[in-house]
Amino acid sequence: MAAQFGRRLRKGAATTAVAAVAVAALSASQAPGVNDHGRQTAADATPSPEASASDGSATGNSPYYTDLPPLKSPNPSPSTGPGPGGTGATEAGIPATVLDAYKKAETALREAKPGCNLPWQLLAAIGRVESGQARGGRVDADGTTIKKILGPQLDGNGFALIKDTDDGAYDGNSSYDQAVGPMQFIPSTWAWAGRDGNGDGKKDPNNIYDAALAAGHYLCRNNWDLSQQGDLDRAILSYNNSREYLNLVMRWLEFYRKGTHEVPDGAGTLPDNRSDDGASPTPTIPGATAPAGSTPRPGPKPEKPATPQKPGGGGTTTPKPPTTPPGTPSTPPATTPTPTDTVDHLEDAGTAKLTAMAGDTFGKRISTRAETEAGKAVAKVRVRFTIVGDTDTTFTGGESVATVATNSSGVAVAPALQAGEKTGAVTVRATVVGRTVPGLDYKATVTERAADTLARTGDAALTCAPGGEFANQVEVKATYDGAVADGVAATATLITSADDATANDKGPYFKDADGKTLRTLTGLKTDAKGLLKLPKLYADDTTGTFLLRITTAGGATLTVELTVAAAETSSPSASASPSA
């Protein structure tokens, strides 16, 4: 198992009594969802219905550190020194690189998802509970942990059952998944939630910058506003679906909000206790690092021999003979299959053609139905929609993944798609969460921005003397179905004639940056108001009427007349005849 995180607490009666008092006091003053005695009720340990409707959990509900923050949150000066195993002011210290990663993630989310209101202290609280701030800040200069931080394998033996999804790429385990890195993402979640937080071109769950940014985006999905307690609770429960976990993270969040400071990397305080203390031992995986802060645990203790009951106790002093022959394997109790277990395949549920112009919201949405082998609809199944490939198209809210539960008709409707600027085909893949069945791919198409109408914004005549400069510039407005058509590509050409769209070799012209003659302009785009103002026009010595044709993507065309004519001169007045 991995190196221990500090000394294990002695389990003596005195320590237990002190801890009980501390927990009760802290619970009464800080914890949400506790009763008047500071102890969690049975209901608190029940996963939240809201979380159950979300996309599982980031960690696969892996174990976490249960150490509580001190009763008082000091606001220490930066000179307050850390010390392993310390309390009070030292507990508020966060390793420098880890703290920097949290704050950078908050800044990035403030720009990417301003409505989320993610505080970096929430990332710090989760980082503390998940890995003790990356094992007290044991990271290199780039923010990557010195050694991998792995949770126990999720083999159903005291933990969730999550079979391998990454062929061991992240966790080194090709049989079962394990939570990975300082923020403890399971590989199947990291596959879609991973981010590159340090700009090195990689998405590494073992890097605190990548993991912190991914955690921020994960907590900000579903349009949650973390300044609202209800959304904050949902976000935390989606990370690990446990009321105890929610209460603990909230305690650390409030602790860090009251004051924290930077300490050197590797000098952070280390937690002692984990939520799986006393659980069955975790099998050793060759070449894999043990769970963060875990300590070797003995195997199950042998059962004590039956103690004869006292007379009058209603029992017997003689054990009953076994009802089955020795060595006969016991039959496990029958289990009722979940709705997810009954899904055999996914079917399209009448999705219409998916097409949108760049920058627009798709008018149609993807609908998928979960069915049994017999074709019967299955309700209450989570379907994950993932946008795959090189595209900047997202779901509304900016995410590339969305998870939706099927309704009573077995249908899950994905959020609306928001087209990006990259044109072409987009693939959205629907899969069943928690069930290995073939995915269902949907094709969407993003077309370039277009206009169907062009009109001049003014009606002044466009005239010029030979060799001169036109007084007015040509400005047009583009629309599509009557709405402003912004960002539409356009071309302007001084054409030969109405029937010949080739560029003219005489008459009006534009100038390039070097003052050279141009009679075709490409790469033009309408602005946010759909307006396009052309550069100044000039005339050579040729007189006559000329044509300027403007075309846009989508087929909008406008032809404008230009006149080059010499200025009119008045005839000289007759002179008076000489006097006789």
Image (cartoon, rainbow, N blue to C red):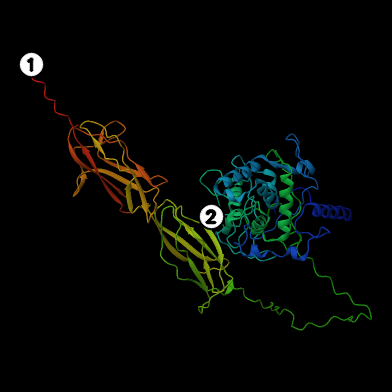
Q: Quadrant of the C terminus?
A: top left
Q: In the rendering, at what x and y percent does residue 69 appear? A: 77, 49
Residue 509 against residue 559 in the figure, above or below: above
Quarter of the image for residue 565 reads top left
Which residue, given by chain and number where applicable, does mark 1 sit on? Answer: 579
Query: Can you tell which quarter of the image residue 577 is in?
Result: top left
Q: Residues within 10 Å of mark 2 (few under 14, many from 20)?
A: some
The front one of 114 and 370 is: 114
Q: Amino acid at mark 1?
A: Ser
Q: What is the three-letter code of the residue carrying label 2?
A: Gly
Q: What residue lies at 51% left-to-right and 63% top-to-bottom?
A: 414
Depth check, front residue: 65 or 443: 443
Can see residue 169? no
The residue identified by callout 2 is 397
Residue lying farthest to the front in this orientation? 580
In this rendering, position of residue 391 left or right of residue 70: left
